Amino acid sequence: MNRAWAFFCILTLSAILGGCGKGGSQNAAQEAGAPASEAPGQPGQAASDTPAASGAQERGAPAAITKAQLPAEAAETLRLIKSGGPFPFGEDGVLFRNSAALLPQHPRGYYHAYTVRTPGLADRGQRRIVCGGPRRQTSDCYYTDDYYTSFKRIAG
């Protein structure tokens, strides 16, 4: 019994320290419903959860983009948000905490994140739309094509 318990503890500890599969704890945080803004060490972000100096957006009001300027897949995601789904990925609609404060501050639970498909990719890719307010409302939405490093407010 003691050997089995020791083996289990070592196996569990190595999984925690080494990560399970590619991406390690980063993938585990995302699979558990934590949006990328909550996962540590995202590309283009420093450990302090502020954008890295790689041209990331400065704090303040995000730039704007019109619906006509969005990729066609983003327009489809907006349509799905308005209709309440069904969404292509189980993670769509999860809470987005805005912990990097790149979007205007609101109470927890205000923002939700949705996948924007990327042609040619089998996984979720880096493109997302984050909307604030009641579900199915698209009047306070933001687009990111760099995995939450920068945002553009979707205008009109």
Image (spheres, rainbow, N blue to C red):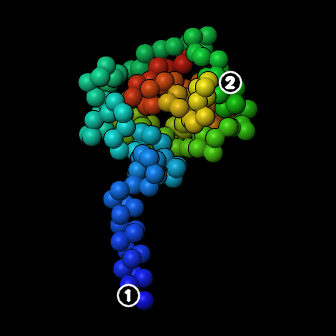
Q: Is residue 109 above or below residue 62?
A: below
- Is residue 32 at all visible to an observer of this figure? yes
Give the quarter of the image for residue 2: bottom left
- Is residue 130 at all visible to an observer of this figure? no
Judge left or right: residue 11 versus residue 156: left
Give the quarter of the image for residue 61: top left
Residue 60 lies, in percent from the top left, at: 34, 22
Secondary structure, mark 1, is: helix
The residue at the point 53 percent across, 32 percent down is: 125
Residue 35 lies, in percent from the top left, at: 48, 42
Residue picked out by circle 2: 76
What kind of residue is marked 2? Answer: Glu
Q: Nearer the viewer, residue 54 or 69?
A: 54
Which quadrant does the C terminus fall into?
top right
Residue 50 lies, in percent from the top left, at: 29, 33
- Give the CA distance from mark 1 to mark 2: 56 Å
The residue at the point 34 percent across, 30 percent down is: 44
Q: Is residue 109 above or below residue 46?
A: below
The residue at the point 26 percent across, 24 percent down is: 53
Q: Nearer the viewer, mark 1 or mark 2?
A: 1
The residue at the point 33 percent across, 23 percent down is: 56
Residue picked out by circle 1: 2
Give the quarter of the image for residue 1: bottom left
Secondary structure, mark 2, is: helix
Q: Is residue 137 above or below residue 62?
A: below
- In terms of sequence position, does the residue under pointer 1 or pointer 2 come before the other? 1
Give the number of marks.
2
Q: Residues within 10 Å of mark 1 (few under 14, many from 20)?
A: few
